[in-house]
Image (tube, rainbow, N blue to C red):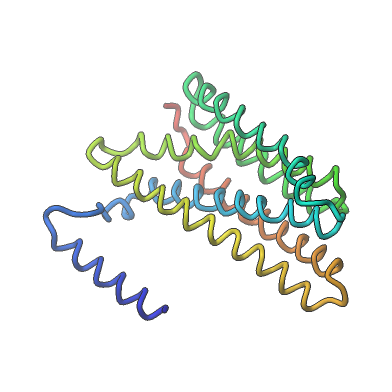
Amino acid sequence: LLAIVCLSGIFFLHNEKNKTNKLLELSLFKNNQFLKLLSAFFLLQYSSLSMSYLIPNVLQILFNQSPSLAGILIAPAAVIDALLSVVAGIIYDKTTPRLPIISGCTIVGLTFFCAMLITPNIVGLIVIYMSFMVGLSLSYSNIMTFSLSQLPVNLRNDGNAIYMTIQSYSGAVGIALASSIISFMQEQRATVIIGTKQGLEINFWLLFLVAMAALLLCLITLKNKAH
């Protein structure tokens, strides 16, 4: 499968390089600002899907919550995401891109830092998820908006296509890696409960590093950006 992927990728790159009517403008990947913001977007989407897997599953495994009750417990985070996404857009329009993006990434980083320090409990996990959604809502969509706004008009459709592809791929990676860590730790420890708890801790460490990387990318890219 890896060989097929590599060969297909090489064929696609060669084919696109020599076409006049290109399917996708791959020169965008040579744009440092676009690439850095795309990477930050990837990392935040990775975190989002990791959390959407971890929190409800941990609530069920560690605290014996039913699937329906676990869904109800994480509902406030979904409401926060829906409401703050609108507010984040207004902040973006009325101030500067730096404010919602940097503050959002900072909140995400602080959330995972706090998550590493607390002993997992129902209330703590719900608060962590809600706090994460606050940061994600402020930064996530605005990163894409700002990134595409900096491209020439004729390249924005290509940029949007790349973002949509990355969104799907990063989400798949997030769920796959988070679930693999949990499964591995469950197999290595004496009980599923202990393994799940330690798998959650490892995931929080990894998500903290991911959040710091996303914040750094945004700080570098948005330095002195007022508009």
**Viewport quadrant of the C terminus:** top left
Percent position of residue 136, x then y: 60, 40
Percent position of residue 105, x then y: 61, 41
Q: Classify residue 17 by image quadrant.
A: bottom left
**Is residue 74 left or right of 152 when viewed as pictured?**
right
Percent position of residue 224, x then y: 46, 33
Q: Residue furthest top?
A: 94
**Is residue 34 left or right of 77 when viewed as pictured?**
left
**Is residue 37 left or right of 52 when viewed as pictured?**
left
Is residue 9 shown above or below 64?
below
Residue situated in front as seen by the camera: 104 or 33: 104
Q: Residue at x 54, y 23 (%)?
A: 91
Q: Residue at x 74, y 63 (%)?
A: 202
Percent position of residue 16, x then y: 20, 61
Q: Residue at x 47, y 54 (%)?
A: 168
Q: Residue at x 62, y 34 (%)?
A: 81
Q: Classify residue 123 by image quadrant.
A: top right
Is residue 9 shown above or below 103?
below
Residue situated in front as seen by the camera: 71 or 111: 71
**Viewport quadrant of the N terminus:** bottom left
Is residue 26 shown above or below 151?
below
